[in-house]
Amino acid sequence: EAGVAQSPRYKIIEKRQSVAFWCNPISGHATLYWYQQILGQGPKLLIQFQNNGVVDDSQLPKDRFSAERLKGVDSTLKIQPAKLEDSAVYLCASSFLGRRENIQYFGAGTRLSVL
Amino acid sequence: DAKTTQPTSMDCAEGRAANLPCNHSTISGNEYVYWYRQIHSQGPQYIIHGLKNNETNEMASLIITEDRKSSTLILPHATLRDTAVYYCIVNPRGKLIFGQGTTLQVKP
C-alpha cells in the first residue's frame, strides 16, 4: 500500500514570495490534514478536510495561507506572501473516515526555508 | 482536552527494552491513548493505540494502568533505528495534539 505522498521535499524562497505544496493521501482515505512543524516543536494542525469539505481550519492563518481539496483526493496548501516565521516543515496526513480510532498516516513533509 | 506529560529525554542501550512513560491523569473514559514516533527528517509514524486493555503489535507493547491515568510504551529490543522523538497523545474528538514528546536515544 502506497503511503502519503508529498512534494516537493524541500523549498527555498524569499519573503513575500508565494509557494505551494502538494499532497496525495493514501487511497480510500477521506480525511486529510495539513500540519506545520516548527523546528524543535511538535506538529500543529493547520487544516482538516473530510472529502472536499473543510472540517477545521481554526489554526490556519487565513490572511496568507489557503488550502483546497477540490476532488476530495489530493490537496494543495499555499502560502502567499510568505514570511520568515513560515519556515517550517509542512506535513500532510490522512486517515480512514468512519473509524473511531482515528489513526493518521503522515507523509515525509516539505521543508520550507524563507529567506 | 486531556493533556499528557512525558520525560524530555531518555537513553537506552541497544538490545535492551525501552520503557517510555506517559501521564494522562485527566483522560476521559472514551479517549484513546496513541503513540507516534518521529525519526529525524521523517513524518510522524503511528506505533500503537489503546483504550483500556494492554496492546501489543509488531512494533511495541502498550501498558495502560487500571485507572487509565498513565501508560508505558515498551520497545522490547531497542535498536539504533529506534532513536526518535516519541509522542504520547490522548485523542479528543479525532484530533492529534502533539506535545514535546520524549527524545529516545538508543546507544550501542
Image (cartoon, coloured by chain):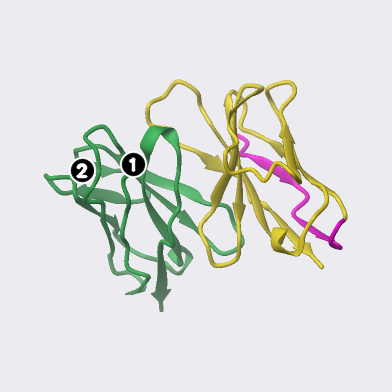
Chain colours: A yellow, B green
Label 2 marks a residue whose chain is B
Q: Residues within 10 Å of mark 1 (few under 14, many from 20)?
A: many
Q: Which mark is residue A29?
A: none
Q: Secondary structure at mark 1?
A: strand
User: Which residue is labeled 2 in the image?
Assistant: B54
**Image coordinates for residue A2, horizontal then vertical, percent:** 63, 36
User: Which residue is labeled 1 in the image?
Assistant: B49
Q: Earlier in the sequence, mark 2 or mark 1?
A: 1
Q: CA distance from mark 2 to mark 1?
A: 9 Å
Quadrant occupied by the C terminus of chain B: bottom left
* Vertical arrangement, residue A10 with respect to residue A94, above or below: below
The residue lying at 60 percent from left, 66 percent from top is A39
Quadrant occupied by the N terminus of chain B: top left
Instruction: Give yes or no for residue A13 being in the magenta stretch.
Output: yes
The residue lying at 64 percent from left, 33 percent from top is A25
**Image coordinates for residue A37, horizontal then vertical, percent:** 59, 56
Please, what is the three-letter code of the amino acid marked with disc 2? Asn
Label 1 marks a residue whose chain is B
Instruction: Give yes or no for residue A10 being in the magenta stretch.
Output: yes
Of B101 and A25, nearer the camera is B101
Please, what is the three-letter code of the amino acid marked with disc 1? His
Q: Do the residues marked 2 and 1 share a common chain?
A: yes
Location of residue B50 by image quarter: top left
Q: What is the magenta range?
A: A1-16
The residue lying at 71 percent from left, 44 percent from top is A6
